[in-house]
Image (spheres, rainbow, N blue to C red):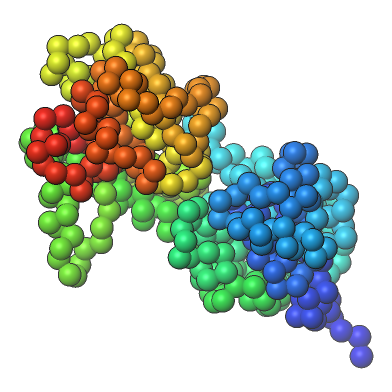
Amino acid sequence: MVQSSDNQLKAKIQDRTARIGVVGLGYVGLPFLVEKAKVGFKVTGFDRNPERAAQVAAGENYISDVRDEDLRDVVERGLVDATTDLDRLGEMDVIVICVPTPLDQNLSPDLSYVKGVTEDIARRLRPGQLVSLESTTYPGTTEEVMRPILEAGGLKAGEDFFLAHSPERVDPGNKRYTTKNTNKVVGGNDPVSLDVAVTFYKQAIEHIVPVSSAKAAELVKVYENTFRAVNIALANEIALLCDRMDLDVWEVLDAAFTKPFGIMPFYPGPGVGGHCIPLDPHYLEWKAREHNFQTHFIALAGEVNRKMPEFVVDKASRVLNMDRKPLNGSRVLLLGMAYKSDLDDYRESPAIHIYRLLQEAGADVSFHDTWTPEIREHGVEAQGVDLTDERLQNSDLVIITTQHSDVDYERVLRLAPRVLDTRNATKQLTPELKREKVVML
């Protein structure tokens, strides 16, 4: 009896003979590639960047969430290779798309990477393949954008090939939750595609959460990050109010979070960064307008969070005024350019916007960050500086924009004349040491 194409593919997945292709070898793609190879699949990574593809092919790691020895091991065992040759997509049984989904300057979705990769796959699509999108996007992308492109050649989703969406849930730097042990949501274009996709993902991930459609899976992801964006915005707005009322927002929130029920900790900061929270809610906001629906919480949260870098610069000016110094011409040192603690990722980091705003105000601005010693984003190109005693002493103001564990904040307070702490990094230091020099967000 001849097996149907879905059963054939499921059999190859279950006995680990299916060839896996991962398109996009960044913070999502590379960890996923390694996890699939660790359970015995042969995996090919695809990336348009020749340098990145060559690094993976040589077993050279560049993602902090991947252990160096894990990548080397699967490469040495012949389970992983990487290439820029998209013609090899036709060899793959499963193709997982992990490409960027940025916003344009008007906060509208930019699906050019997704569309481009889908067109590349469509030119090489053959019966029996599974295509799964992991990139975060608005509800409807998989079915409304990808499926027509893939079906243009005559093959039909759910019959000839299989189409799914399974949103990434990567939290860079998280040592507890990894690709393997983070619950994985999977939605299919149709029931057959869902069955094939669930079979694929459960081979290397501990718990799979099937949902009714690809559109539902897409909404799951943007809701998760919208939830965080809205609650961070609320904490930021409370910080703005506390500034007006001359209250310590950190004291207020820490006390509030002692309540054992009905509340969840979210803290303010200089803004939001990374590949999710500053971007994903606007995908949902954009899609909602298509349905004549206004997402008021999302729009307001984005407005509050985007204003925080300006607030930090305004407060920096006020702190300098305490010493009768103008912002224009003052030496300002930023501590931290990564978007979160102990991470080498500065995508959409609020510190970059603060750096640029300080420059535009005429400040002599520099930064120190051993995790991200060089910055090239949003018109800012800068090299970090060493955190020497002399630099701390000669700064008019030090702004803590990212809290890193390798910074001795007690030393910073001893040597710097003034410190603006936007992350509560000095929380554990003695009040006597902080009282003379530290101004909180």
* Front in this rendered view, residue 365 or 254: 365
The residue positioned farthest toward the bottom in the image shown? 1
The residue positioned farthest toward the front in the image shown? 389
* In the displayed structure image, the side of residue 235 where residue 3 appears, left or right: right
Question: Where is residue 150 drawn, in percent x and y?
Answer: 78, 55
Residue at x-position 64% and y-position 55%: 68
Above or below: residue 99 compared with residue 256? above
Residue at x-position 80% and y-position 55%: 81
Residue at x-position 25% and y-position 61%: 264
* Front in this rendered view, residue 2 or 316: 316
Q: Is residue 71 visible?
A: yes
* In the displayed structure image, the side of residue 92 where residue 101 appears, left or right: left
Question: Where is residue 364 drawn, in percent x and y?
Answer: 36, 14
Question: Where is residue 32 drawn, in percent x and y?
Answer: 64, 61
Quarter of the image where one finds residue 164: bottom right
Question: Where is residue 207 drawn, in percent x and y?
Answer: 54, 76
Above or below: residue 249 compared with residue 324? below
Residue at x-position 27% and y-position 53%: 266
Quarter of the image where one finds residue 358: top left
* In the displayed structure image, the side of residue 432 where residue 401 appears, left or right: right
Quadrant of image for the N terminus: bottom right
Quadrant of image for the C terminus: top left
Above or below: residue 421 compared with residue 18? above
Count of labels shown? 0
Q: Is residue 222 visible?
A: no
* Front in this rendered view, residue 300 or 339: 339
